[in-house]
Image: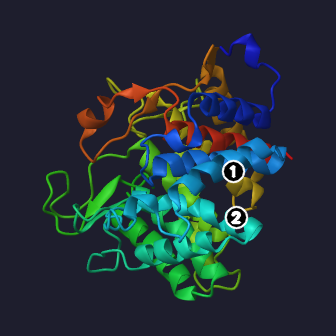
Amino acid sequence: MANSFYQGHTATEYARMACDTMMKKFAAEDLPPKDRFHYHQGVFLSGVQQTWHPTGDSKYYDYFKAWVDHEILPDGSILRWSKDQPKDPDQLDDIQPGILLYELYERTGDERYKKALDYLAPLVYYFPKNKEGGFWHKYRYPYQMWLDGIYMGGPIAAEYGAKFGHPEYIDQCILQIKLMCKNTRDEATGLWYHAYDESRQVAWSDPVTGKSPEFWGRAMGWVPIGVLDELKFIPEDHPERQDVINIIMDLLKAIAKYQDPETGLWYQVVDKGGCEGNWVESSCTCLYSAAIARAVKAGYLPEEYMEIALKGYHGIIDRLRYDERGIIVDNICVGTGVGDYQHYIHRPTGENDLHGMGAFLILMTAIAEALD
């Protein structure tokens, strides 16, 4: 049960507690991995940014801006890939934080943010692709598409396309969604496998389908969160917009069926809740519940799905702890490659890591917005 400390708080208040906890622990420029432009900071700071919107508290704006200003040099180049370290990102994970730059550019007019976007967004557009045109997840994983890539590369590219007159970027985002669905979706469950290998050469890939063997929680959560962000920038009259909506609503309906009825949470390996060694995982629960709440708010899912989102939200709140450090979100998978069932269930967990806290903030702000 939830500690009595938490009873009666709003979702926005929980978001503030989480931000304050992490801001007390880390100066913005020290967020790990320090001096790396990476999605760990990007997803967490996106949550901080989203917390700033309803609260209007300038300390949250100042915090995510301070990290960006540490990473973006005065000429618009990025610290890690500056002239002293001339190496472009070799994975989509290292492009995602660019999503923070749009609002800073619009609010300040500082051209260095636009210059950085002019560098980052084309990296997504021209990222290495398999024969169908699907992005590799990383240079060192040729021909492999991972679900995570939808979130890591899609929203920054779609927003760039909409705001700076590049409709081809939006079309490419839609292609990635359709290819990922085609190549990872399981017909029996409607769930999406963690990854797909076009070459069928890596050990985890099915020799016939190229699909990986399991449905990993957090990877599947990035998909609807990323696509719902992209839908803000796909024109209403785009001929494939409804296809995208249908694909993601089909996925969310499939995910909803696997919510644990007792706790409201979802499992690390989503479809095997009753199997030995499996465990409920916080970050995927946050992402699923947030995506469902946002889809209901947008009118894509029927109102009754909000009960599922709220059950997940309350399941997360019931797990919260609090000590001298502040709020504690636990049971966060620290991250993983692609593997079999034993691989996923034996991954270590952490507390308050950045992608877990980022997912928590995404959920808190989604619930707050949905209940307005």
Q: Quadrant of residue 63?
A: top right
Q: How many marks?
A: 2
> Which circle marks residue 151 in the picture?
none
Quarter containing the N terminus: top right
Is 327 rendered above or below residue 360? above
> Which circle marks residue 103 in the picture?
2
Is 310 rendered above or below residue 338? above
Left or right, 67 with respect to 142, comes to right
Classify mark 1: helix, strand or loop.
Answer: helix
Mark 1 or mark 2, earlier in chain = 1
State the residue in front, 228 or 24.
24
Specify few, some or many for label 1: CA neighbours under 10 Å numbering under 14, 14-19, or 20 or more.
many
Q: Amino acid at mark 1?
A: Gln
Question: Residue 290's spot in the image, x, y percent?
Answer: 64, 46
Q: Is residue 258 visible?
A: no
Q: Residue at x 50, y 53 (%)?
A: 222
CB contact under 8 Å: marks 1 and 2: yes
Q: Quadrant of residue 263?
A: top right
> Which circle marks residue 49 in the picture?
1
Is 169 rendered above or below residue 321? below
Left or right, 366 with respect to 70, comes to right
Q: Is residue 4 visible?
A: yes
Classify mark 2: helix, strand or loop.
Answer: helix
Question: Residue 257's spot in the image, x, y percent?
Answer: 54, 43
Question: Residue 103's spot in the image, x, y percent?
Answer: 70, 64
